[in-house]
Image (tube, rainbow, N blue to C red):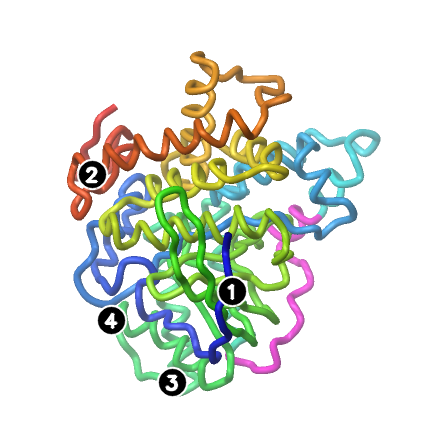
């Protein structure tokens, strides 16, 4: 049970600090992109620079009955899965197959929105935030996301493009003089935004740099029940958003970051959750609470293993939300290790099915039909306990992950076990 303890004071976010792993540099670790990005929070723990965030993906009801439709409609579901890997450009073929007389209303709405956002690039801009600097900063990030997601800039080119544009913007508004220091460039918008009364987070959220902007926040304390302990944690409830980040942009408003874990607190998109629901208890508090505990228990752990453990924690406690969670993990799973959430989804679904049925999960159909929580909960706990033991055997304070080691690494200087 998660017990709120008391309210706290609002405070500006600290985007100059790595929210999970502290401060670090070596921007080249993620500028190389591809498989190297998997390990850069572990390789780059030196001093000061770009934040890296582990977030909860949340489905949003942007269109009429979208939540239901997006999970059952083939085109919408396939598009979300690709977009959440940061690759909406690869999903264009999904809409090309839709003819005027075929496809659902949602299909056509998505096709039109995709065409205007990523092809014509003539969609209406978001409403003004009320100040020019914030509007211009958001415009820069939306351009960066578009160019990167459509493959017009490589990962390294995208970072260089973003740094140059941000640098020019903060110089123009007299927040800093010209700088080639990546750390200083990426810190500078936070300083400016704080002066304007805007909270912000510009963490790197694989595979792209993110930008979340919001106007109000308040904090409460909770005690979260985990499978092996209770975790006391401060939860920052954020509201009045100007930007919900690249996941909301890529998925055409169908999904968004629902929150994330940092070393000092959990951050929650307030309006997106019913705080009395099992969904909030399991998919936010216990998922992010697992991250919060693991940051101390396994300080070097890679994001894929962190996500694997948090998703198993959801399954260890879920009851009424179990079918939705299982289907989400299965439908949004992928063997793409450049998308940590998708890869962790795949591994959780695969490992759980093997544990329950002693066979491989079928590639089609409804593999979780009629499955009960009294079977899934203990199986998920057993998998989580097994993973904990594997990490402790390797050395809790130094292990980068058990699943991470099994991923073949093909980037320069990377090695891994198949």
Q: Which residue is mark 1?
A: 4
Among the two numbered marks 2 and 4 on one chain, the one whose residue lies closer to the N terminus:
4
Among the two numbered marks 1 and 4 on one chain, the one whose residue lies closer to the N terminus:
1
Q: Is residue 132 above or below residue 260?
A: below
Q: CA distance from mark 2 to mark 1?
A: 31 Å
Residue 409 seen in this snapshot: yes
Residue 159 position in % (x across, y down) = 35, 58
Among the two numbered marks 2 and 3 on one chain, the one whose residue lies closer to the N terminus:
3
- Tell me the magenta residue range: 113-133
Q: Which residue is mark 3?
A: 175
Q: CA distance from mark 2 to mark 3?
A: 46 Å
Nearer the observer, disc 2 or disc 3? 2
Nearer the observer, disc 2 or disc 4? 2
Residue 296 is labelled as none
Residue 410 seen in this snapshot: no
Among the two numbered marks 4 and 3 on one chain, the one whose residue lies closer to the N terminus:
3
Bin the neighbour count of mark 4 within 10 Å (Cα to Cα): few under 14, some 14-19, many 20 and up. Answer: few
Residue 255 falls left or right of residue 44? right
Q: Secondary structure at mark 1?
A: strand
Q: Is residue 372 above or below residue 261?
A: above
Q: CA distance from mark 3 to mark 1?
A: 39 Å
Q: Secondary structure at mark 3?
A: loop
Q: Which residue is mark 4?
A: 181
Among the two numbered marks 3 and 1 on one chain, the one whose residue lies closer to the N terminus:
1
Residue drawn at x 36%, y 74% is: 167
- The residue closer to the viewer here, 5 or 179, is 5
Among the two numbered marks 2 and 1 on one chain, the one whose residue lies closer to the N terminus:
1
Residue 291 position in % (x across, y down) = 37, 51
């Amino acid at each position: 049970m998660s017990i709120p303890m008391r309210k706290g004071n609002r405070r500006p976010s600290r985007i100059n600090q790595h929210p999970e792993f502290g401060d670090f540099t070596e921007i080249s670790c993620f500028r190389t992109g591809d498989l190297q990005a998997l390990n850069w929070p572990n390789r780059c723990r030196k001093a000061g620079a770009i934040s890296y965030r582990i977030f909860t993906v949340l489905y949003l009801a942007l269109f009429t009955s979208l939540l239901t439709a997006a999970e059952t409609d083939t085109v919408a579901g396939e598009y979300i899965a690709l977009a959440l890997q940061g690759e909406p450009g690869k999903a264009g073929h999904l809409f090309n197959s839709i003819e005027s007389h075929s496809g659902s209303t949602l299909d056509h709405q998505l096709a039109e929105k995709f065409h205007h956002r990523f092809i014509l690039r003539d969609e209406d801009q978001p409403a003004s935030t009320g100040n020019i600097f914030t509007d211009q900063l958001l415009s820069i990030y939306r351009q960066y996301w578009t160019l990167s997601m459509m493959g017009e800039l490589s990962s390294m080119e995208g970072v260089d493009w973003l740094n140059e544009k941000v640098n020019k913007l903060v110089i123009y508004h007299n927040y800093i003089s010209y700088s080639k220091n990546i750390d200083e460039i990426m810190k500078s918008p936070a300083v400016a935004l704080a002066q304007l009364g805007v909270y912000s987070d510009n963490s790197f959220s694989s595979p792209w740099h993110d930008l979340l902007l919001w106007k109000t926040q308040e904090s409460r304390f909770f005690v979260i029940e985990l499978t092996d302990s209770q975790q006391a944690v401060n939860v920052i409830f954020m509201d009045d958003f100007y930007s919900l980040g690249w996941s909301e942009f890529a998925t055409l408003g169908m999904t968004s970051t629902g929150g994330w874990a940092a070393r000092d607190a959990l951050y929650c998109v307030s309006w997106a959750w019913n705080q009395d629901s099992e969904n909030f208890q399991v998919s936010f508090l216990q998922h992010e609470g697992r991250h919060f505990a693991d940051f101390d228990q396994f300080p070097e752990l890679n994001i894929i293993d962190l996500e694997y453990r948090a998703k198993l924690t959801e399954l260890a406690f879920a009851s009424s939300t179990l079918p939705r969670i299982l289907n989400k993990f299965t439908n949004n799973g992928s063997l793409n290790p450049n998308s940590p959430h998708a890869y962790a989804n795949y591994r959780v679904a695969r490992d759980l099915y093997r544990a329950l049925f002693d066979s491989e999960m079928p590639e089609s159909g409804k593999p979780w039909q009629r499955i009960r929580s009294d079977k899934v909960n203990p199986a998920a706990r057993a998998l989580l306990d097994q993973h904990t033991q594997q990490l402790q055997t390797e050395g809790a304070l130094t292990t980068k992950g058990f699943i991470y080691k099994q991923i073949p690494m093909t980037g320069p200087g990377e090695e891994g076990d198949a």
